[in-house]
Amino acid sequence: MSLFFSSTRGFANVADYREAARRRLAKIAFDYLDGGAEDGNTLARNRAAFANLRFAPRTMLDVSSVSPATRLFDYPASAPFVVGPTGLNSLFWPKADETLAAAAAARGVPFALSSASTSLLEDVRAAAPGGELWMQIYVQKDRRIAESIMRRASAAGFSTLLVTVDTPVHGRRDHDVHNDYRLPLRVTPKLLADLLRHPHWAWQIARHGTPQLVNLARSLGETPNLQRHAAALARQMDLSLGWSDIAWLRKHWQGPLLIKGVMTVEDARLAHRHGADGIVLSNHGGRQLEGAHAPIEVLPAVADALGGALHLYLDSGVRRGADVVKAVALGARGVLLGRAPLYGLAARGAPGVAHVLSLLYEEIVTTMTLLGSADIETLPARLAGDSPGTSRSASPLSGRPPLAPIPHAIQS
Ligand SMILES: Cc1cc2nc3c(=O)[nH]c(=O)nc-3n(C[C@H](O)[C@H](O)[C@H](O)COP(=O)(O)O)c2cc1C
Ligand SMILES: CC(C)CC(=O)C(=O)O
């Protein structure tokens, strides 16, 4: 890494890293990272929905020692967030998945590896030996791929499985069409101009080679071939996947199992009924269904319907520690971070990821201190509705059950 890119001085928040990532990455890569589906309405709504929630702080409470520590399944996490699964990460920085996993371990939070990762899951384990690792899978028509990834992840000590169900087809990403984004990247005059404007990124890609979907390749027993495996990823999703397949997943995965991409009370109930341990309320960061609600908007109804029966996580739009606090206050056990750590990675590599995670951690602590919450159990009593003047006692959240440990739906 060059000296120029090593400093994290002057970065105050995730948005600063986003801007630095925008400057360093070629447009084709930044738009893939940053963009949403179609007109970007859901992408924007994810942020607006967080901004519209208001806190009801309490004062004169002892905040001399504030801790956002919590338990995420059996893992004692330093804070209620997880570095979430994102595919093709070495498009942003070499050895990206190892870097993200090591940063998460150092911060004391889980890292979730995408099955579309550009590093082998075994290499990620080696890069974060003591870290808490989760594995995400897409289920493709050839079920042996998912079975092989589950087997390998289990052998490598990954604790928790995320099954992503909001991507039967890819959302329509207009920016990718405009940029002529395809894998492997094809050198067109447009891409060449883009590369010339972003020489540091171009040099990195040239030096380290095009990222490969190595986990997918290994589970197929094939030599990595980006063209073939990217096409397989996009076109071979099992569109027949249904709730009864949780039983099949259970045969291959003994640990906690979360369904990622649930957006309704009905589906949350079905996940529970079919034996999932938890769900991630997610609209895939506004990258899939344009016109979806923001997950934070549906969280209160889902939390009330489940009444603590499932581990409830949320993602999409988390850019501030206050967003994490709001999600926990509304009933989430924790949040997944999608783009936020990627901005740090794309801007500055390992120091950038570490700084983003520590900024979020510090923002959580500051928010809790200003709210009069010394620990996360008190957070549900600190959020009022979004209408001005909503009083604390009128909070729809008062009286919600505390976040008690939840046993797995199925014990091994
Ligand atoms: C570049 C990128 C790649 C992603 N790849 C995956 C993936 O491979 N598997 C998955 O389940 N979700 C994937 N997601 C979705 C994230 O896990 C997460 O749901 C989303 O980014 C959360 O929104 P946020 O980015 O606003 O935090 C990806 C998101 C981004 C931005
Ligand atoms: C590699 C892709 C499957 C990643 C993804 O889920 C996304 O771009 O949103």
Image (cartoon, rainbow, N blue to C red):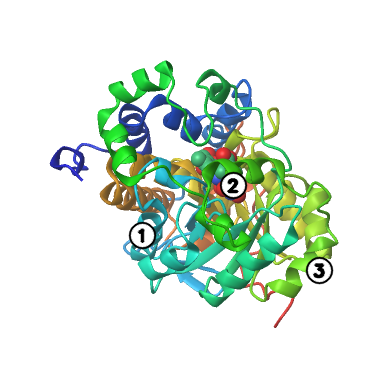
Kindly identify the amino acid type of the residue bearing the numbered disc 3: Ala
Q: Is residue 56 visible?
A: no
Does 255 appear above or below 243? below
For the residue labelled by badge 2, is the local secondary structure a helix, a strand or a loop?
helix
Mark 2 vs mark 1, foreground winner is 2
The mark total stands at 3
Mark 2 vs mark 3, foreground winner is 2
Q: Position of residue 13 (x, y in %)?
A: 33, 39
Residue 247: image tag: 3
Does 217 appear above or below 276? above
Direction from residue 365 to residue 214 in the image, left or right: right
Q: Where does the C terminus fall, quadrant-wise?
A: bottom right
Is tag 1's residue or tag 3's residue first in the polypeptide sequence?
1
Kindly identify the amino acid type of the residue bearing the numbered disc 2: His
Residue at the spot 55% in from the left edge and 75% down from the top edge = 74
Crowding around mark 3 (Cα neighbors within 10 Å: few <14, some 14 to 19, many 20+) is few
Residue at the spot 85% in from the left edge and 61% down from the top edge = 244
Is tag 2's residue or tag 1's residue first in the polypeptide sequence?
1
Direction from residue 407 to residue 18 in the image, left or right: left
The residue singled out by tag 2 in the image is 229
Residue at the spot 47% in from the left edge and 51% down from the top edge = 118
Does 226 appear above or below 275? above
- In-front residue for pair 15/35: 35
Residue 63: image tag: 1
CA–CA distance in space, label 1 to label 3: 46 Å
Q: Position of residue 152 (x, y in %)?
A: 57, 71
Verify CB contact (< 8 Å) between mark 1 and mark 3: no
Image quadrant, ligand 1: top right
For the residue labelled by badge 1, is the local secondary structure a helix, a strand or a loop?
loop
Does 398 appear above or below 338? below
